[in-house]
Image (cartoon, helix red, strand yellow):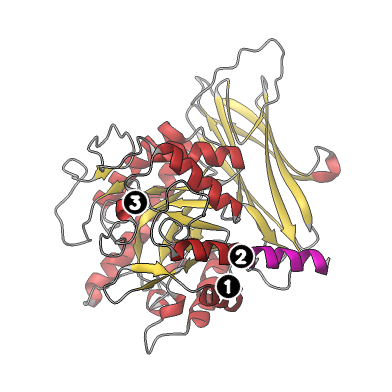
């Protein structure tokens, strides 16, 4: 929400996550957020939007820990026309930054001075990963009644207050990044529908003015509930823009995503916890999914690269510092090698899954992870890990994965700068929750992971 600030002084200092004041918007994002190891560089993103009625000049300063000359990381001056935006990227090496730190962004426009601060922690490590799960997907309602068999009936009855509870329970085990799976439910697939922006039949999980039909759930606005609780706890929420259609990156899908992203930003962008945009459609690691002909494989690869180039360009107009994430699987990545460089130029975070179930004849999970890391390093993008915290029953319903297997993945795949898991609702359950989502084994997994997390943190303290 835009806030008008009436000035009695020439300058006013505002310290929040994103600043609206006078004619401008100033924002700061750290990639990754929260705790990282000193083997991971910190990607600092600053964004400015001139929302006034005249061209403006800006002085931009980025500091580490203190506002003083010796702590200055970046300084620049820019001129922005009416309605224009600008973003700055500064990469900080964290090798010698072990401990608690903060990044301070100061922007002056000649009338006001804005200050935005973000905290981060660096831990000593010999690998990139923290060996902990840093966050999790949170589906408002599982897309598959078969896969979500053990929790869909329960999650449908969750109230806004119970979504507050769930956010707190995630925070209690260090899962401080929440990925909202999707904000619309629509079960279609690329190439198998005739939808467009005007006849889109999907139903919303929030009060949408674009498409007012609602998924029948008890909560009035679970997005607001998640964001508002995450604000209080200093967590990060990745807003799932979707579902248009699975694996669909066509021009029509792009236009739909633009309109939905703008509505989500207008409704929820003032929340400090609104961290990024996540494109819900997913994709195979080959970047063309199941297309059989070479011609159609090239079409799909071109579509996904075009989609993220244009979507990134659009998001920069109003939220230039906000990253964009996509989850692919880890299979067939060599077949997508010709398209990854172009894709990752406009995709900030790649978060692949499926490393524990690589098909016969493909790479090993570790080999696929290393290749994807090279793709991301070459493009200046970020590789996160979508750890699957579930297994399939014979009927394809999901159940909590044994903690030993989760720990095995956390230990084996150690190059990821952030680890997220799929998913929290229905797989983990805090025993203190007023409503259990899913079966009893979800409580056991929560308690086992909590013990593992505490053991890892205890070892860190003992090794200092």
**Residue 346 visible somewhere in the drawing:** no
Residue at image coords 25%, 77%: 294
Q: Earlier in the sequence, mark 2 or mark 3?
A: 2
Q: Which numbered disc covers residue 132?
A: 2
Kindly report which numbered mark, 1 or 3, lies closer to the viewer in this rendering: 3
Q: Earlier in the sequence, mark 1 or mark 3?
A: 3
Q: Secondary structure at mark 3?
A: helix
Depth check, front residue: 414 or 39: 414
Is the residue under label 1 in contact with that under label 2 (CB below 8 Å)?
yes
Depth check, front residue: 185 or 317: 185
Residue at image coords 33%, 44%: 157
Count of numbered marks? 3
> Is most of the magenta stretch helix, strand or loop?
helix
Residue at image coords 30%, 34%: 208
Q: Earlier in the sequence, mark 2 or mark 1?
A: 2
Q: Is residue 280 left or right of residue 434?
A: left
Task: Write down the residue under mark 3.
Answer: 154
* Residue 459 within the magenta-colored segment of the rendering: yes
Kindly report which numbered mark, 2 or 3, lies closer to the viewer in this rendering: 3
Please provide the residue range marked out in magenta.
Answer: 452-463
Residue 450 in percent (x, y) is at 60, 62
Q: Relative to 397, say whether 57 is above or below.
A: above
Residue 144 in percent (x, y) is at 27, 60
């Amino acid at each position: 929400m835009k806030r008008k600030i009436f000035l009695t002084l020439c300058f006013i200092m505002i310290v929040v996550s994103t600043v609206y004041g006078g004619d401008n918007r100033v924002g700061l994002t750290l990639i990754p957020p929260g705790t990282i190891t000193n083997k991971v560089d910190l990607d600092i993103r600053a964004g400015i939007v001139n929302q006034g009625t005249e061209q403006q000049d800006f002085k931009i300063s980025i500091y580490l820990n203190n506002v003083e000359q010796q702590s200055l990381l970046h300084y620049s001056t820019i001129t922005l026309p009416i309605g224009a935006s600008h973003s700055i990227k500064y990469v900080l090496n964290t090798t010698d930054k072990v401990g608690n730190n903060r990044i301070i962004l100061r922007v002056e426009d000649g009338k006001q001075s804005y200050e935005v601060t973000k905290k981060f922690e660096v831990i000593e490590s010999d690998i990139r990963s923290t060996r902990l799960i840093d966050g999790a997907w949170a589906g408002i309602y599982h897309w598959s009644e078969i896969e979500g068999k053990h929790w869909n009936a329960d999650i449908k009855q969750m109230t806004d207050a119970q979504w507050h509870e769930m956010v707190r329970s995630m925070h209690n085990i260090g899962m401080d990044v929440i990925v909202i799976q999707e904000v619309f439910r629509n079960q279609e697939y690329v190439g198998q529908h005739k939808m467009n922006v005007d006849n889109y039949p999907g139903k919303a999980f929030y009060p949408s003015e674009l498409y007012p039909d609602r998924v029948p759930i008890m909560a009035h606005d679970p997005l607001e509930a998640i964001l508002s609780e995450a604000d209080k706890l200093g967590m990060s929420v990745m807003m799932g823009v979707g579902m248009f259609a699975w694996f669909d990156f066509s021009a029509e899908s792009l236009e739909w995503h633009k309109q939905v992203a703008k509505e989500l930003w207008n409704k929820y962008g003032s929340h400090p916890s609104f961290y990024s945009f996540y494109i819900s459609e997913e994709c195979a690691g080959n970047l063309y999914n199941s297309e059989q002909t070479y011609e159609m494989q090239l079409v799909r690869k071109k579509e996904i690269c075009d989609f993220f180039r244009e979507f990134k360009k659009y998001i920069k107009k109003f939220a230039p510092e906000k990253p964009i994430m996509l989850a692919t699987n880890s299979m067939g990545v060599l077949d997508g090698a010709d398209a990854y460089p172009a894709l990752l130029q406009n995709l900030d975070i790649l978060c692949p899954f499926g490393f524990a179930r690589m098909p016969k004849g493909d790479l090993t999970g570790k080999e696929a992870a290393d290749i994807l890391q090279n793709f991301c390093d070459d493009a200046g993008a970020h590789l996160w890990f979508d750890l699957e915290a579930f297994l399939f029953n014979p009927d394809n319903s999901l159940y909590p994965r044994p903690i030993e297997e989760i720990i095995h993945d956390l230990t084996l795949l150690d190059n990821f700068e952030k680890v997220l898991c799929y998913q929290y609702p229905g797989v983990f359950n805090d025993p203190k929750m007023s409503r259990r989502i899913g079966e009893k084994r979800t409580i056991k997994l929560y308690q086992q992971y909590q013990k593992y997390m505490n053991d890892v943190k205890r070892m860190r303290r003992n090794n200092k």
